[in-house]
Amino acid sequence: MKVKTSITLSPDVILELDNLAETAGNRSAVVETALRAYFAARKREHRDREDLALINANADDLNHEALDVLGYQVEL
């Protein structure tokens, strides 16, 4: 179920919104699509930060393991 709401936007944003709404159907569709994309990007950024923190926390062990594996390579 959708909920009707009201927001206040700058005139230049409304102009861009209306331009996009011509192909998307209406303003609500454009705003909903934009917000969903924004929310997904925020979640992705959060996940990426957590992944990077995990990698950094284990960097020494990972680097040691990589060096160990390189020792098994056969020269051609």
Image: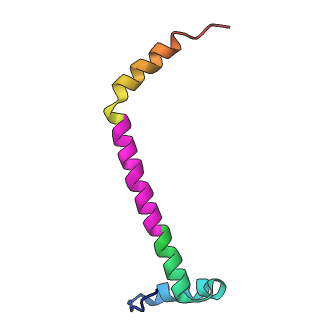
Please, what is the dominant secondary structure of the magenta stretch? helix
Pick the front one: 17 or 1: 1
Residue at image location 51% in from the left, 10% down from the top: 71
Residue at image location 46% in from the left, 14% down from the top: 68
Q: Is residue 14 above or below residue 62?
A: below
Q: What quarter of the picture does the C terminus occupy?
A: top right
Q: Is residue 3 above or below residue 65?
A: below
The scheme the figure's colours follow is rainbow
Judged from this view, the residue extending furthest toward the right is 76
Judged from this view, the residue extending furthest toward the top is 75
Q: Give the residues in magenta.
A: 38-55
Q: Is 40 left or right of 49, judged from the image as shown?
A: right
Judged from this view, the residue extending furthest toward the front is 1
Pick the front one: 25 or 20: 25
The picture places residue 59, in percent across and down from the top left corner, at 36, 29
The picture places residue 11, in percent across and down from the top left corner, at 46, 90
The picture places residue 32, in percent across and down from the top left corner, at 50, 79
Total labels: the figure holds: 0
The picture places residue 40, in percent across and down from the top left corner, at 46, 64
39 drawn magenta: yes
1 drawn magenta: no
Q: Quadrant of residue 56?
A: top left
Residue at image location 43% in from the left, 67% down from the top: 39
Residue at image location 61% in from the left, 8% down from the top: 74
Q: Quadrant of residue 60?
A: top left
